[in-house]
Amino acid sequence: MADEKVEIVRSSSSGVVGRARNSTRNAGLVLDSSTRPQPDAFTNSEAFLAGVSSCGVTLIEMHAQETGVPLERMTATIEGVRVPPAPRFSRITMRFELVGVSQAQAEALVETYRQR
């Protein structure tokens, strides 16, 4: 289809069990297994959560710019809770902090993210 967007990520062994090299376009990222985290890389679970929260930041920032809302900066903090041995998150919460906008504007911006 003409309107499809295909994104490709390649993951490969790194030579260290529990660590993978990932690449897309000209960018690279090392990810560790969530069961064998090292201090110098995100785990797979952390990368998943970062993808969700960074989507919120970029979507809200771009929407604010497009609609003339004076958002100066923002932070999204996401927390995922898992109960071992289950590999799934049992709960995920996200908190947004927006600077430069009124409470009503902040709520409208966050609602835009929730609706998409």
Image: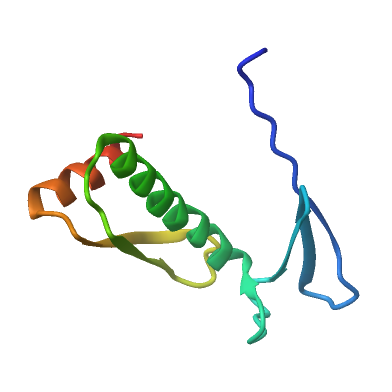
Quarter of the image for the C terminus: give it.
top left
Horizontal side, residue 70 vs residue 91: left or right: left
Q: Position of residue 55 (x, y in %)?
A: 45, 49
Placement of 109 over or under 82, stated as above or below: above
Closest to the observer, 61 or 2 = 61
Name the residue rendered at 64%, 28% in the picture: 5
Name the residue rendered at 32%, 42% in the picture: 65
Q: Position of residue 8 (x, y in %)?
A: 75, 41
Horizontal side, residue 106 vs residue 94: left or right: left
Name the residue rendered at 27%, 60% in the picture: 96
Horizontal side, residue 56 vs residue 16: left or right: left
> Which of the colour schemes (rainbow, by chain, secondary structure, one colour) is used?
rainbow
Closest to the observer, 63 or 36 = 63
- Whether residue 113 appears in this view of the structure is no
Closest to the observer, 109 or 22 = 109
Name the residue rendered at 52%, 64% in the picture: 86
Q: How many marks?
A: 0
Q: Position of residue 83 (x, y in %)?
A: 44, 70
- Whether residue 108 appears in this view of the structure is yes
Placement of 14 over or under 94, stated as above or below: below
Quarter of the image for the N terminus: give it.
top right
Closest to the observer, 45 or 67 = 67
Residue placed furthest toward the bottom? 39
